[in-house]
Image: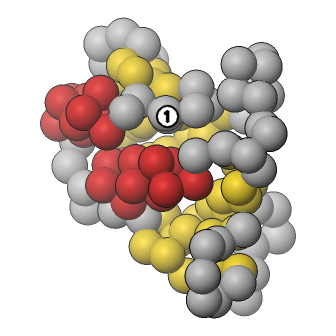
Amino acid sequence: MPATVQPVIVTPTLPLLLAFYKALLGAVEISRVPEDGPAFYVGLQIGNAELGIVTDGEADIAAPQRILLNVNVGDLSVGGVEALLEHVEALGGRVLGPPNDMPWGQRVAHIQDPDGNTVNLTEPI
C-alpha cells in the first residue's frame, strides 16, 4: 500500500542524491519513471517509509529549504548516529554539528544532504 503522505525532493542532481540516501541510510529503489533510460522520478524505500526524488535541471538548491527529513536510523540497520556522521561528507553532504542526547530519549545529529536539505538522524538512547 502506498504511503498516505510521501515527501518528495526536487533536485538538479538526481544521481548524487540517490547515491547519498542509498549509501548513508540503506535506501532501496522501489520505483523509477520511466523504467528505462534517464529517470525523472525515483521512489526509495527507507525502513518503513518512502521518499521520492524528482529531477529538475532548473531546481534552485540555493533557495531556502522547506523540507526536514527526520530519520530514525535505529529502524534501518545502517549503524548508529555517530557512525553515520563519518560518511556524510564523503557522500557529498554536510554535518551541522555533533550528536546530542535529547531529554525525550533520542540521540540526534543534524546534517544536510548534497542539495542542502536538512536531515535529522535520530536513534533511541
Drawn side of residue 3 relative to residue 104, left or right: right
- Where is 12 relative to 62, above or below? below
Which residue lies at the image location 68% right of the left edge and 45% below the top edge? 11
Q: Nearer the viewer, residue 88 or 15?
A: 15
Where the N terminus falls, by quadrant?
bottom right
Where the C terminus falls, by quadrant?
top left
Q: Position of residue 23 (x, y in %)?
A: 30, 55
* Type of colouring: secondary structure
Q: Amino acid at mark 1?
A: Asp
Residue found at the far top of this picture: 97
Residue 77 visible to the viewer: yes
Which residue lies at the image location 82% right of the left edge and 70% below the top edge? 4
All told, the count of numbered labels is 1
Residue 74 visible to the viewer: no
Toward which corner of the image does residue 60 lie, by quadrant?
top right
Q: Nearer the viewer, residue 122 or 66?
A: 66
Helix, strand or loop at label 1? It is loop
Drawn side of residue 102 relative to residue 40, left or right: left
Drawn side of residue 92 relative to residue 56, left or right: left
Binning the other alpha carbons within 10 Å of mark 1 as few (below 14), some (14 to 19) or many (20 upward) gives: many
- Where is 21 relative to 64, above or below? below
Q: Position of residue 38 (x, y in %)?
A: 61, 73
Which residue lies at the image location 70% right of the left edge and 69% below the top edge? 41
Which residue lies at the image location 36% right of the left edge and 19% below the top edge? 95
- Where is 117 relative to 77, above or below? above
Q: Which residue lies under the disc numbered 1?
A: 113
